[in-house]
């Protein structure tokens, strides 16, 4: 308990430091050519990009500084040093650190999509090795209704490691593609982090105490530094967080999900990101054309955002594109305008879907709506995890 209190105090100072550093270092980023233009504003001023590297570094430094404190007692008694727990923490730090580096490289070099998928897989390898050495549990408990077919548990062996590697790829990219309006990347991460912390505190009295204690030691400094970043990224954004932040966040959530054995619960907290990913699949796999930016279209006259669109030429349309369009139309999930030669379709993101269902709105209103939805999904996640879990598992 003491270690959590000390970590919370350290994290409070990490918040203050991040809050102080961001405005001070902003100009360095602009001078280095790391800036973007806010596409939903009239003003075309340069906004520093990749500021997630500042919060990410302070987050890692906080955990590094905490190591001698957290493991202090064990250092006195070297014979009983908890090597396994230490290896877990180091693997977690290494994976997050790799993503910080790769995310920053992406912000500077604008990497291709294939690297965005490959790099998190490689960065998750240390985690998987530690998982193999410390737990190597690759067994899924089968939900009660399916037990007559599969038995109580199923050991999926190597597939479990593939699942964990894919979790890291999903978490890192899912936040990055639910983005483009002020405060959304950071806001959703703050809600997910708070949900995980709340879940950890509930479970702290259970038999998985150690795993949730580990998760809290990662999530508390993460939340503190991210809150400081949110202050500067909130509407109207004075800084952009860049892919660095999205990658660090995604990997942090994947790390706690994997090493604290609650990856399925983490996925429940990612419900809006899963919806956004599934809805985006036709564009991500180029079944429907995907422009460089899919963020909403800003109208200077009304100061409102409306769904941005993509154009499909009818003569280039494949059979698969036709099927996908028909399915989306049937489900009333698209807003399309058709003429003789082309179909104009909204870009397939959750942000645009909200705009076509609720009508044009201001940027701040849109961010708040999406964050309320994120919070609502957290409530659903807890409902599934607790009251409803007893229908599926022996709890
Ligand atoms: C992802 C999305 C892209 C979206 C972009 C916005 C996919 C496949 N890619 O691309 O559709 O447009 O994120 O972040 O879904 N920006 C703003 N306001 C904001 C945040 C960002 O205008 O609040 C703009 C700025 O010009 C900024 C740029 O987006 O420079 C950053 O985009 P970047 O993170 O490089 O895009 P991707 O992650 O590649
Ligand atoms: Mg991005």
Image (cartoon, rainbow, N blue to C red):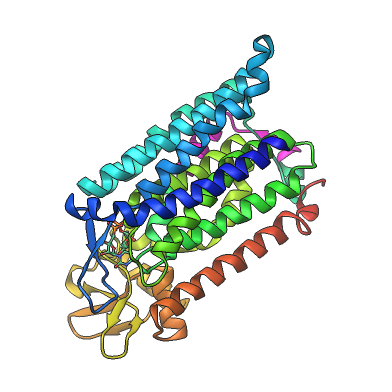
- Asked whether 156 or 100 is in front, the reply is 100
Q: Which residue is drawn at 32% across and 86% down?
A: 303
Q: Quadrant of residue 304?
A: bottom left
Ligand 1 - quadrant of the structure image: bottom left
Q: Residue at x 24, y 52 (%)?
A: 29
Query: Does any portion of residue 81 appear in the rendered image?
Result: no
User: Residue 329: percent from the left, percent from the top?
Assistant: 41, 78
- Main SS of the magenta segment? helix
Find out whether residue 167 is within the magenta segment: yes
How many numbered marks does the figure carry? Answer: 0
Query: Does any portion of residue 299 appear in the rendered image?
Result: yes
Q: Is residue 174 left or right of residue 268?
A: left
Q: Which residue is drawn at 68% across and 53% down?
A: 198
User: Residue 201: percent from the left, percent from the top?
Assistant: 72, 48
User: Residue 62: percent from the left, percent from the top?
Assistant: 50, 38
User: Residue 231: percent from the left, percent from the top?
Assistant: 45, 63
Q: In which quarter of the image is residue 6?
A: top right
Compared with 274, 88 (above or below) is above
Compared with 156, 394 (above or below) is below
Find out whether residue 124 is within the magenta segment: no
Q: Is residue 215 left or right of residue 273?
A: right
Q: Which residue is drawn at 58% across and 23% down?
A: 86
Q: Give the range drawn in magenta.
A: 150-171
Q: Quick one: quadrant of the N terminus? A: top right
- Asked whether 37 or 150 is in front, the reply is 37
Q: Residue furthest top?
A: 79
């Amino acid at each position: 308990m003491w270690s959590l209190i000390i970590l919370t105090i350290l994290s409070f100072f990490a918040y203050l430091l991040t809050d102080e550093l961001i405005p001070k270092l902003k100009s360095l980023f602009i001078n280095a050519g790391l800036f973007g233009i806010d596409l939903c504003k009239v003003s075309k001023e340069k906004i520093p990009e990749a500021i997630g590297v500042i919060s990410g570094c302070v987050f890692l430094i906080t955990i590094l500084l905490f190591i001698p404190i957290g493991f202090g007692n064990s250092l006195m008694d070297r014979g009983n040093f908890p090597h396994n727990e230490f290896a877990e923490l180091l693997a977690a730090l290494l994976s997050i650190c790799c993503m910080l580096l790769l995310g920053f490289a992406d912000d500077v070099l604008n990497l291709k999509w294939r690297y965005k998928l490959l790099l998190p897989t490689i960065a998750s390898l240390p985690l998987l090795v530690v998982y193999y050495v410390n737990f190597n549990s690759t067994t899924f408990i089968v939900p009660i209704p399916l037990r007559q077919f599969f038995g109580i548990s199923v050991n999926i062996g190597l597939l479990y490691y593939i699942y964990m590697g894919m979790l890291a790829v999903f978490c890192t990219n899912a936040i990055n593609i639910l983005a483009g309006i002020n405060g959304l990347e950071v806001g959703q991460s703050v809600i997910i982090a708070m949900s995980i912390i709340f879940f950890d505190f509930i479970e702290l009295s259970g038999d998985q105490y150690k795993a949730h204690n580990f998760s809290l030691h990662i999530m508390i400094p993460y939340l503190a530094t991210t809150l400081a970043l949110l202050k500067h990224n909130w509407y109207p954004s004075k800084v952009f967080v860049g892919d660095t932040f999205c990658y660090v966040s995604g990997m942090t959530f994947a790390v706690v999900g994997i090493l604290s054995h609650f990856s399925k619960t983490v996925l429940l907290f990612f419900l809006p990101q899963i919806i956004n990913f599934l809805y985006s699949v036709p564009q991500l796999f180029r079944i429907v054309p995907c422009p460089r930016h899919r963020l909403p279209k800003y109208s200077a006259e009304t100061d409102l955002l409306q769904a941005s669109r993509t154009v499909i030429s009818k003569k280039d349309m494949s059979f698969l594109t036709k099927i996908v369009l028909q399915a989306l139309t049937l489900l009333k999930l698209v807003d399309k305008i058709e003429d003789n030669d082309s179909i104009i379709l909204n870009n397939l993101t959750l942000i645009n879907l909200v705009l076509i269902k609720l009508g044009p709105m201001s940027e701040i209103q849109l961010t708040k709506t999406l964050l309320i939805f994120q919070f609502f999904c957290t409530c659903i996640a807890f409902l599934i995890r607790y009251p409803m879990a007893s229908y599926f598992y022996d709890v």
